[in-house]
Amino acid sequence: MELEPYRKSVHDDVMTSALVQAAGSLVDDLLDRVLVGDEPVTSAAEGKRLLDRDDDLDHVTDRIQRFVGLATPAVRMLARGAKFTRVPWVLVATSTASTGVTIRSSIREVRVLASLVAHRLEQATGAPADPALVKKVTLDLYLSPRREPDVSDLSLPLVRLVRRWLIRGVLGRDTRKAAGKALDAAERLDVDAMLARRARHTRA
């Protein structure tokens, strides 16, 4: 199945402010815990191994459930409006459950990626990583691993993140391969050049 019809069907009317705010709250809580939490992820290979283990997201389960509840009307709208090639009624019936699984997996992937990003920033600067920069770089890499993170503006691409969650949830797509690409991109990232770009924008 092609993703493009689904991208075109995700209009602003399903991207409610409450849904985007819930995603922002979830990301903030998750990544703030990363920055003050356990041992960092120091390589893409280590991050991929962590993703193979059972998740430990009990502390955000309530937030995940709240987000899925808010997303349910949008998920149903997307499932009804999309042009499926096979048994659309099955996908409509399972879309909400699939979205919950996708979001939980994605959140874990974002957390592992953020830990690697924070580690790379700390290695480059010798100081604790800027939380706002970690969050922006993490989401930029997660959503577009082939592009350099845009550090000229540290506002988070939450609408794009929610759109990704909804599309992949409706389709029931496995997110692990994309997460692996994002981890590889974080490991290859030219942190010094990125920090120099950030410094220029800060002075401007």
Image (spheres, rainbow, N blue to C red):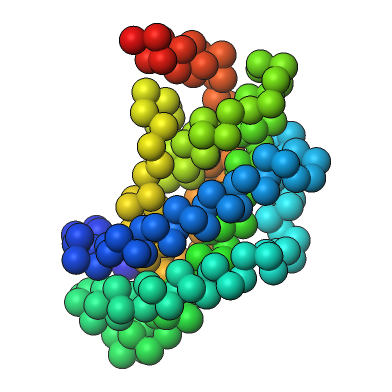
Residue 109: x and y in percent read 59, 53
Q: Is residue 120 above or below residue 57?
A: above
Q: Nearer the viewer, residue 159 or 165?
A: 159
Q: Residue at x 36, y 83 (%)?
A: 91
Residue 39: x and y in percent read 80, 41
Q: Is residue 156 above or below residue 13?
A: above
Instruction: Identify the image quadrant of the N terminus.
Output: bottom left
Q: Nearer the viewer, residue 36 or 15?
A: 36
Residue 15: x and y in percent read 27, 62
Q: Is residue 135 above or below residue 6?
A: above
Residue 67 seen: yes
Residue 178: x and y in percent read 50, 50
Q: How many marks?
A: 0
Query: Which residue lies most toward the right here?
Result: 39
Q: Is residue 56 left or right of residue 158?
A: right
Instruction: Identify the image quadrant of the C terminus.
Output: top left
Q: Residue at x 41, y 32 (%)?
A: 154
Q: Residue at x 52, y 16 (%)?
A: 195
Residue 187 seen: no
Q: Residue at x 37, y 23 (%)?
A: 152
